[in-house]
Image (tube, rainbow, N blue to C red):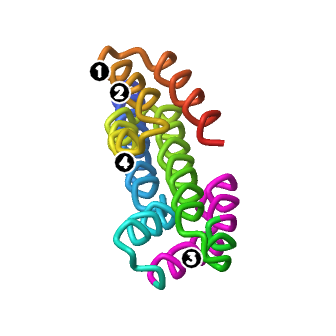
């Protein structure tokens, strides 16, 4: 085989392997972001306490959950055990915010703005991080990734 042709063939194979692995990693990242605390919050808002307990317990055992979200899930379970539903909802809301914002931050760092926007839209539904999530969405729309990352970090600080 001719040397320039061989180089071209090898570079094409390497490029196709990179594209395939990047697409696979993106699909795995989308599938591997459990949102048990957010599901627990939705169940609490619908007054389905037993379902909320199940989701919050699943959040504690899921290895993909952010540590902050697990801590809020633990606090929400303790509040449910003490029959303090408003406190449990607050803790679950904080945990859901940590979930969504952490996954958005990871997607932004991995250069997946569409995936980050999906998590940020979910975070924008939570009152205490709404402004940070909307700011990050506007930054993504303007292709300002660094500013979006700063906005997400500010939201994470607010969520605790």
CA gap, disc 1 to disc 2?
6 Å
Residue matched to label 1: 141
Q: Depth-wise, is mark 3 or mark 1 nearer the camera?
A: 3
Residue matched to label 4: 23
Q: Residue at x 62, y 66 (%)?
A: 76
Residue matched to label 2: 137
* Residue 74 in magenta stretch: yes
Q: Depth-wise, is mark 4 or mark 1 nearer the camera?
A: 1
Residue matched to label 3: 58
Q: Is residue 106 left or right of residue 18?
A: right
Q: Position of residue 69 (x, y in %)?
A: 62, 56
Q: Are marks 1 and 2 in contact (CB under 8 Å)?
A: yes
> Compared to 154, does 1 lie above or below?
below
Q: Position of residue 22 (x, y in %)?
A: 42, 44
CA gap, disc 3 to disc 2?
29 Å
CA gap, disc 4 to disc 1?
22 Å
CA gap, disc 4 to disc 3?
28 Å
Query: In what quadrant of the picture does the C terminus appear?
Result: top right
At numbered mark 4, what does the secondary structure look like: helix, strand or loop? helix
Q: Is residue 2 left or right of residue 86?
A: left
**Badge 3 or badge 2: first in the primary sequence:** 3
Q: Depth-wise, is mark 4 or mark 3 nearer the camera?
A: 3
Tell me if mark 2 has few (under 14), some (14-19) or many (20+) residues whose alpha carbon lies within 10 angstroms of its own: many
Tell me if mark 4 has few (under 14), some (14-19) or many (20+) residues whose alpha carbon lies within 10 angstroms of its own: few
Magenta segment: 51-75
Q: Depth-wise, is mark 1 or mark 2 nearer the camera?
A: 2
Nearer the observer, 130 or 47: 47
**Badge 4 or badge 2: first in the primary sequence:** 4
């Amino acid at each position: 085989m001719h040397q320039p042709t061989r180089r071209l063939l090898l570079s094409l194979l390497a490029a196709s392997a990179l594209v395939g692995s990047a697409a696979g990693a993106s699909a795995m990242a989308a599938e591997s972001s459990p949102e048990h605390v957010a599901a627990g919050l939705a169940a609490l808002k619908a007054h389905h306490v037993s379902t909320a307990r199940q989701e919050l317990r699943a959040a504690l055992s899921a290895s993909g959950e952010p540590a902050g979200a697990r801590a809020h899930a633990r606090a929400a379970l303790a509040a449910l055990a003490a029959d303090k539903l408003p406190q449990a909802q607050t803790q679950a809301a904080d945990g859901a915010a940590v979930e969504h914002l952490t996954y958005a931050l990871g997607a932004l760092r991995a250069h997946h703005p569409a995936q980050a926007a999906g998590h940020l839209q979910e975070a924008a539904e939570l009152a205490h991080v709404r402004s940070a999530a909307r700011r990050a969405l506007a930054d993504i729309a303007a292709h300002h990734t660094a500013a979006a990352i700063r906005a997400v970090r500010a939201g994470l600080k607010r969520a605790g």
